[in-house]
């Protein structure tokens, strides 16, 4: 019984910590940038593909960001995640490289 209380306590504490880390709303969503553009799916795809290089550059240059805040919401985010998964191997990359057992 005591272990159940400890496990429940850890789960509740973990949920509170994760909830505290959740980002707030993007107030720049659907608002054009200085150039008058709102980033969509294709821009998100490109930003996802370029994200490793842009991350390294952003460490040394404060004016460079990885994620465009002037975006159209879900489609930009979907494109960004697709582009990042292309670069970082996607979900099935390791499945084809696994060793195959021979059937007896």
Image (cartoon, grey):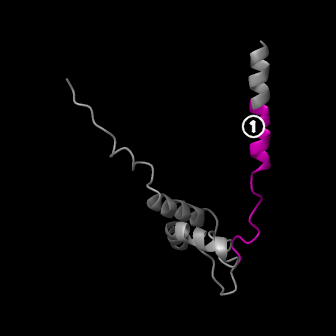
In this view, the residue in front, 53 or 20, is: 53
**In this picture, which residue range is highlighted in magenta?**
11-31
Query: Is 99 drawn above or below residue 60 in the view shown?
Result: above
- On screen, residue 75 versus residue 102, left or right, reads right
**Residue visible at 53% across and 71% down?**
53
Which residue was labeled with disc 1? 14
**Residue visible at 78% across and 43% down?**
17
Q: Residues within 10 Å of mark 1 (few under 14, many from 20)?
A: few
**Residue visible at 62% across and 69% down?**
66
Residue 70 in which image quadrant:
bottom right
Residue 44 in which image quadrant:
bottom right
Answer whether residue 60 is magenta in the image: no
> Where is residue 102 drawn, in percent x and y?
22, 30
Residue 23 appears in the picture as rendered: yes
**Residue visible at 51% across and 70% down?**
50
In this view, the residue in front, 7 or 39, is: 7
User: Which quadrant is the C terminus positioned in?
Assistant: top left
Query: Is 7 drawn above or below residue 30 in the view shown?
Result: above
> Where is residue 36 drawn, in percent x and y?
66, 85
Residue 68 appears in the picture as rendered: no
Query: Is 101 drawn above or below residue 61 in the view shown?
Result: above
Q: Residue furthest left?
A: 104
> Where is residue 101 drawn, in percent x and y?
26, 32
Q: Residue furthest bottom?
A: 35
Answer whether residue 24 is magenta in the image: yes
User: Which quadrant is the N terminus positioned in?
Assistant: top right
């Amino acid at each position: 019984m005591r272990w159940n209380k400890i496990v429940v306590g850890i789960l509740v504490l973990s949920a509170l910590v994760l909830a505290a880390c959740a980002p707030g709303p993007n107030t720049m969503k659907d608002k054009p940038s200085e150039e008058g553009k709102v980033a969509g799916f294709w821009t998100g795809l490109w930003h996802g593909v370029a994200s490793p290089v842009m991350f390294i550059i952003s460490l040394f240059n404060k004016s460079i960001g990885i994620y465009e805040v002037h975006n159209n919401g879900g489609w930009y985010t979907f494109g960004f995640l697709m582009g990042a998964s292309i670069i970082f191997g996607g979900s099935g990359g390791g499945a084809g490289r696994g060793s195959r057992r021979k059937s007896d």
